[in-house]
Amino acid sequence: MAKPAKFLRNVPRLSTLFPLVLYVLFILCILVLAFSSRSHSDGKGQKTEQAGSGASSNESPDGPAPLVYRKLEESVLKELTEAFAKADTNGDKHLTVQELAKFINFKIREHIDEAIRTNPIMFVEIDHKPRDGLVSWDEYQGYWLRGQGIQGDSHMKKSAFDKLDRKVKESIARDKAHWMEAARTDPLSLTLDEFLSFRHPESSTVNLLNLVDDILRQFDEDGDDHLTVEEFSDVQTTDLGEGKKFILSQNVRERREEFTKVIDKNRDGKADRGELLSYVDPRHPRYAIQEASTLFTLADANKDKKLLMHEMLAKSAIFISSKMVHTAESFHDEF
């Protein structure tokens, strides 16, 4: 009996073992939870990676994964995909710079033809108080405000004008400035041709003839109303003044080549007003070629001279504001 009693005296008391057991159990629970959480995270990460690689492997060489498409607004995606499909005339799922230039030139011609066709229709619709063959600023302003759902005219009270949205006020101020530029005979009214210059300056023959005059004034050194290749290739004379929009090459070799191949159509060594008018006309293919080349430079990521759909979508902001998609807005930002 002495040995068992001695043994029992050496065994720790229950009050000492209980906290120790609880502490060990607590540590074990923490370890189990931590291991379980880590295993779950690793599994989730692995699934995500597999899903990602699956999306990448399923990605068509002609376009990005669906996630890229979802980043674009539906309307923007629709406009770009429709434009791409129309420009891709042979249906090979990519555009060459020639295809893009041809499509841009088509859009430019379509826009200008439409502007010239609809100009008399709008002119007659606005010209009614009185119907005198002229559109006054008051007539136009009332017509424009009604189109915006606003009741008023150019004589609206200041209190009413102050309540207009800021963008509306900016549009009115911008229109007024363009109006004054187009009004060559009377600042308060426009003729039919002047109205076309006001609404679509890129479509106005009068504007283009004025541009030809500016070119001759700057380059025609002997004043014979013709340009020679030597006069045109003078790279020091390039400033036609604010608002004059046309594109010139920037070195002598390019200028001479442009004069010979593009401007001097009858190959007589001189450019007359008719040839210069064709040269500055936005419908001239050179404008479309230059814009297409610029778009390719910005969007052809792998420089393979083939524009794929996903390359165009990656530069959506550039294309949506170009003449490929929004032709009218692009012109009106320039002129």
Image (cartoon, rainbow, N blue to C red):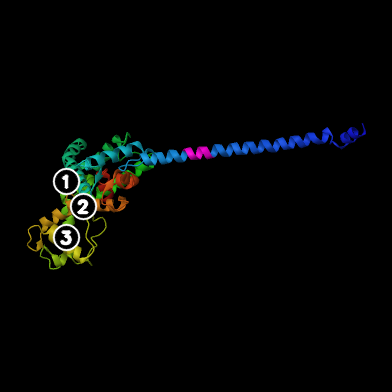
Residue corresponding to mark 1: 193
Element carrying mark 3 = helix
The percent position of residue 176, horizontal first and vertical second, equals 28, 47
Mark sitting on residue 227: none
Residue 131 visible to the viewer? no
55 or 153, nearer to the observer: 55
140 versus 253 height, above or below: above
How far apart in space, not on screen, are marks 3 and 1 (Cα)? 31 Å
Counting from the top left corner in percent of width and height, residue 148 is at 31, 36
Q: Is residue 116 left or right of residue 84?
A: left
- The label shown at residue 289 is 2
* Label 3 sits on residue: 258
Q: Is residue 235 left or right of residue 4?
A: left
Q: Is residue 82 depicted above or below 225 in this figure?
A: above
Q: Amino acid at mark 3?
A: Glu
- Indicate the position of residue 172 as horizontal and vertical percent values: 31, 44
Viewer-nearest residue: 106 or 53: 53
- When asked about the image quadrant of residue 10, the answer is top right
- For the point 77% across and 37% down, the residue is 20
- Report the amino acid beneath label 1: Asp
Highlighted range, magenta: 42-47
Q: Are marks 3 and 2 in contact (CB under 8 Å)?
A: no
* Residue 47 in view, yes or no: yes
First reached walking from the N terminus: tag 1 or tag 2: 1
Q: Residue 291 location in percent, x, y? A: 24, 51
Q: Residue at x 60, y 38 (%)?
A: 35
Q: Nearer the viewer, mark 3 or mark 1?
A: 3
